[in-house]
Image: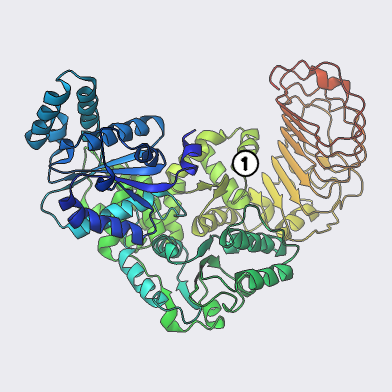
Amino acid sequence: MASSLKSKRKYHVFLSFRGEDVWNNFLGHLYRALDQKGIYTYVDNEELRKGEQIDLALMKAIEESQIAIIVFSKDYASSWWCLEELVKIIDCKKERDLMVFPLFYKVEPRELRTPRGSYRDAMVKHESKYGKDSKEVKRWEKALSDASYLSGWPLKDGDEAELIQKIVTEISTHLNRTLLHVAMHPVGIDSPMVTLKSMLNLESDDNVLMVGLWGQGGIGKTTLAKAVYNDIYNQFENSCFLANVQEVSKDCKDLVTLQEKLLFEILALKERLVVSNVDRGINLIQERLCHKKVLLILDDVNDLYQLHALVGEGKWLHNGSRIIVTTRDNHLLTYLGIDQDHVYKVRELDDDDAHELFSKHAFLTHQNFTIKIDLVDRVLNHAKGLPLALEVLGSFLRGRREYEWESALDDISTAPKKGINDVLKISYDGLEPKVKEIFLHIACLFKGWNSEYVKKVLDSCDLKAVIGLQILMERSLIKIESGNIQMHDLIQLMGMDIVNQESDDPGRRSRLWQYDDVVDVLSSNMENCAVKAILLKPPEPTEMCISPNAFTKMRRLRLLILCNIHDFFQGPICLPNGLTWFDWTGCARQIPEFSSGPKKLVGLNMSKGNITGVIKQFKDFQNLKYINFSYCKSLVRMPDLLCTPNLEELDLHNCKDLVEAHKSIACLNKLQVLNLEECSKLSVFSDELRSKNL
């Protein structure tokens, strides 16, 4: 309810105050500062206050505001009108999710709480007019008391200009208009922001200007770009921050997705334009954006084709536009024609900022024990000002005792490598065995994947995904953004390195994700294969010639995920009974076979395949919870599921030729999700379903 109310609100800020002296000095400056930031502020004009009835338009303005700032000055309580405003504001805070911030202008909060001084004098006058126990007076006293406990800003004899800037910054953050989350603790970015804004030359509209942010992974390029974006986006007609360009644009299809997002955000469309291909997207960007002054940030660019598809040579936008590109490759910026005067090299934090950032992550606010300074210095020396390393190490050491710090730092000092990989690996080494398994699965297989899907896969391996992912987030090893699991490149490379270091022989490693490694292992006759998980996801559809029994020797294999792999098997694929998750989307032609006896399979996904028929019965699949045959448009009949008593989800949507749903579907007591959407030929279906969980 609160979010729907907020979306309909007209004003960003409602200012409640009393007295021309306040307006002509502090408040007038505050209003102009808010206005310059594009914050739409309602100011109550005292000249319109007439009679004994408060204006309904004023009450409506309070209701239509996202934030209320109440300036409690010396004479505020002398106005019954202001007190009525205050009552309404407090009511809206409780009922309409209005954010309320008091500003104590040369008064103390306690003067409101138990009226003293001028507030006491004002309430005495009101009592004499309305009665000491009158309804009005009690409402006003209660509202004053409630407001006195709210968090706000005090102003006595301090720097008013500094306070105004602080208020504007905090209000901008709370409004959550198009602001980006910069960092949990943004440290050391103020000075770089000044330099970068100077490079952007925002006062000039003579041409389109491109600026590059260059530096190694984990150095803070994205953090700085987000901070600058938040500070200047309202100086442009529209703006767009395209995050993780390298990760998103792995093939042409994903580049089209970025082009669609760029057009959607800058044109402020209600729904996305459909871009058929990259070349069409290039023309649309040129045609639709050439008249707009925009701010565009391309984050983590690593290839020229990304720039060609999104900004060309930077000449597609209207004069006055600004483009910021973050990258690890300085040559990309040179190719774009960005001279070195407009390339900002993001450097490591200096000693003071590094210490501050580390401390914010490492030390609890009310920590009741101390850590020796030399231990902190050792951490800082190993991190060498790299923000990501400071964050990860700080999170790992947070709340730990001194002897634990010493043990951790001794491990760093004896590690064979001296690079960042060793620093990051300390957080990994502190994990419990099952959480380590989850981390390595994500680093090698599931970065960028939907978190709910990954939870199901991990739980199929009995890895307790919910608590495991939570621990990894607490250690700053992963983040969940927009429902997808994200991990910094350096941390991912560290995890991959851990697996690669298990053996020079791919068959002796726990996980395989490189095409050549998988082919090598499947083509060999190695006994006692150590592989637990395989992910094959080439960018283009690929054919492989492998024996149908290639997987049977992999006794330890638990996860097998194939994408864009055509049906390369000579006969049905045979899988080990120990496999817990099998995902083969897009290309499968037949259901896999298993050896006789109980199977451990929990998830089976054959969606978008060319399956014409399935085995008559899923026998001995006691653990099977998830079956997905969606978009198998040639599937006519579903199998007998009587021997899958734990099945929770059955997805058959868009199986256009499906005629019969086997009667065993009625006996699935644990079924929670049954999707038969767009199964237009379905004619045989049970009259009754026993499951009470659907």
Q: Is residue 326 above or below residue 104?
A: below
Question: Which residue, as the protein is rendered here, is positioned at the far front?
Answer: 51
- The number of numbered discs placed on residues in the rendered structure image is 1
Q: Is residue 540 above or below residue 399?
A: below
Q: Is residue 244 above or below residue 85?
A: below
**Quarter holding residue 660:** top right
Mark 1 Cα shell of 10 Å, populated few (<14), some (14-19), many (≥20): many
Q: In the rendered view, does 476 fall on the left or right side of 329? A: left
Q: Is 391 or 158 nearer to us in this picture? A: 158
**Residue placed at 79% from the left, 17% from the top?**
689
Residue 306: x %, y % from top left: 62, 70
Q: What element does badge 1 sit on?
A: helix
Q: Is 656 or 497 nearer to us in this picture? A: 656
**Residue placed at 50% from the left, 48% from the top?**
478
Q: Is 647 or 17 nearer to us in this picture? A: 17
Residue 618: x %, y % from top left: 84, 28
Which color mode does the image show? Answer: rainbow
Q: In the rendered view, does 579 fall on the left or right side of 418? A: right
Residue 20: x %, y % from top left: 18, 51
Q: Amino acid at mark 1?
A: Val
Q: In the rendered view, does 600 fall on the left or right side of 231? A: right
Q: Circle 1 sits on which residue?
A: 454
**Residue placed at 42% from the left, 41% from the top?**
64
**Residue placed at 80% from the left, 54% from the top?**
565
For the question of whether residue 292 can be seen, the reply is yes
Please state, as top left, top right, bottom left or bottom right, where the C terminus lies in the image: top right
**Quarter holding residue 277:** bottom right
**Quarter holding residue 196:** bottom left
Q: In the rendered view, does 323 fall on the left or right side of 310? A: left
For the question of whether residue 400 can be seen, the reply is no
Residue 410: x %, y % from top left: 34, 52
